[in-house]
């Protein structure tokens, strides 16, 4: 499974360059890469097309990726005093 971060790193792409390829605002792409939000099906398809199928639509919703996002969010949670 390819992730947005791994694809961009492998291909030496910045968020601005990825924005040019997908038509998705670079800030939104950053939120996807951080696991803050998941793309809509339309944006997942745009990423699929821009990556020539290397990031598949189902990659965004795979159990492994969703688990990774959940773990990231748990690590970001503010501590209660």
Image (cartoon, rainbow, N blue to C red):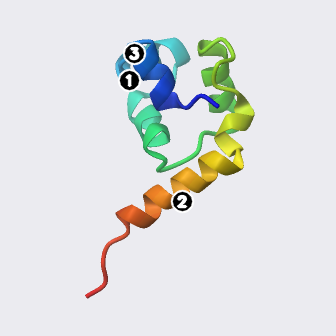
Please state the horizontal and vertical placement of residue 81, each as a whole percent of the image: 25, 88
The residue under the point 52% across, 48% down is: 37
Dot 2 or dot 3, earlier in sequence: 3
* Looking at the image, residue 26 lies above or below residue 12: below
Alpha-carbon span between mark 1 and mark 3 = 7 Å
Q: Is residue 57 visible?
A: yes
Q: Which mark is residue 15?
A: 1
Q: Residue furthest bottom?
A: 81
Q: What residue is shown with label 2? A: 70
Callout 1–callout 3 Cβ contact below 8 Å: yes
**Closer to us: mark 2 or mark 1?**
2
Q: Quadrant of the N terminus?
A: top right
Please state the horizontal and vertical placement of residue 32, each as a whole percent of the image: 49, 40
Q: Quadrant of residue 54?
A: top right
Label 1 sits on a secondary structure element that is helix
The crowd level at tag 3 (other Cα within 10 Å; few <14, some 14-19, many 20+) is some
Foreground residue among 61 and 23: 61
Callout 2–callout 3 Cβ contact below 8 Å: no
For residue 78, side relative to residue 54 (left or right): left
Foreground residue among 45 and 73: 73
The crowd level at tag 2 (other Cα within 10 Å; few <14, some 14-19, many 20+) is some
Q: Which mark is residue 13?
A: 3
Callout 2–callout 1 Cβ contact below 8 Å: no
Dot 2 or dot 1, earlier in sequence: 1
The residue under the point 60% across, 15% down is: 51
Q: Is residue 19 visible?
A: no
Alpha-carbon span between mark 2 and mark 1 = 23 Å
Q: Residue furthest right?
A: 58
């Amino acid at each position: 499974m390819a992730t947005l971060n791994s694809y961009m790193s492998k291909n030496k792409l910045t968020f601005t360059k990825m924005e040019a390829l997908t038509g998705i605002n670079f800030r939104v792409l950053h939120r996807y890469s951080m696991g803050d939000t998941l793309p809509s099906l339309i944006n997942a398809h745009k990423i699929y097309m821009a990556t020539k199928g290397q990031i598949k639509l189902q990659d965004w919703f795979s159990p492994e990726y969703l688990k990774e996002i959940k773990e990231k969010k748990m690590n970001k949670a503010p501590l209660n005093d």
